Image (cartoon, rainbow, N blue to C red):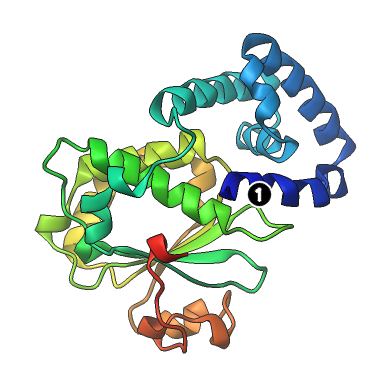
Amino acid sequence: MEAMNVTRVREEVRVEDDCTETELNKIRLLRAMVEARDPSAKEEDDFTIRRFLRARDLDLEKASTMFLKYLKWRHSFVPNGSVSVSEVRNELAQEKVFVQGHDKIGRPIAVVIGRKHFQNKDGGDEFKRFVVYVFDKICASIPPGQEKFAAIAELKGWGYSNSDVRGYLGALSVLQDYYPERLGKLFIVNAPYIFMKVWQIIYPFIDNKTKKKIVFVDKNKVKSTLLEDIDESNIPEIFGGPLPLVRLQDI
């Protein structure tokens, strides 16, 4: 039902209203290229096509390769169109991802509590499904006229038991390969020294576009830094604002 609602909203917000003529031409060309290879591409809207184009700096060949890879992945990994709650119960039980408020330009804000994440004992399959569940839920909450979300990673209390490098790299790959141009900004808050050791491993795998969206926040300037992008009324209460956190599964 959510996907149907998003499609209807997209019909009201035309991609032509926020595109250069060059982008419009390349959207048409890319659509023709991918539909010839995979007819299921006809189900994707122009906004999706444009995100993949922008992720590859409007290079048609690179964008088509990326988009076709996305379609193949989506059909195999999410054959029913979405990840159900029953498929990610253990991950949801950790209550580590919340959505609350929006920033000054209307992007919904996701809050991730790093100390609540632990490596899944099943080898990571459920966590991969959880990552897709998270991105799909957040993207479904993005309002008309927006395509991106903001995120705050709260790392107070993060320790070695939370250092799931394989899981983090898997989540990064899903974000960059299958949800391009969805992340608007990521604030990393209260990162302890031991986290920076793990960050050194992860950093080389982050593409340049994503790196520019990541901000490490000084622990003594958390609220003031967030206020540069988020109105006081939309600051989550754990960062000194008025809004209680809402569990991802409850939005």
Q: Is residue 6 above or below residue 248?
A: above
Instruction: Name the residue at 41% across, 88% down.
Output: 240
222 horizontally vs 95: left or right: right
Instruction: Name the residue at 14% across, 37% down.
Output: 122
Outermost residue to the top: 37
Outermost residue to the right: 21
Q: Is residue 60 above or below residue 164?
A: above
Residue sitting nearer the eye, 28 or 200? 28
Q: Is residue 38 above or below residue 117?
A: above
Instruction: Name the residue at 50% across, 56% down.
Output: 138
List x then y, in percent, for residue 228: 57, 78
Instruction: Name the residue at 19% across, 47% down.
Output: 164
Query: Can residue 203 be seen here?
Result: no
Q: Dot 1, crowdedness within 10 Å: few (<14), some or many (≥20)?
A: some
List x then y, in percent, for residue 79: 44, 27
List x then y, in percent, for residue 134: 41, 51
Which SS class for mark 1?
A: helix
Residue sitting nearer the eye, 70 or 221? 70
For residue 171, what is the image quadrant? Answer: top left
Outermost residue to the front: 1
Query: Can residue 148 be seen here?
Result: yes
Q: Amino acid at mark 1?
A: Val
Disc 1: which residue: 6
60 horizontally vs 152: left or right: right
List x then y, in percent, for residue 46: 74, 35
Q: How many marks?
A: 1
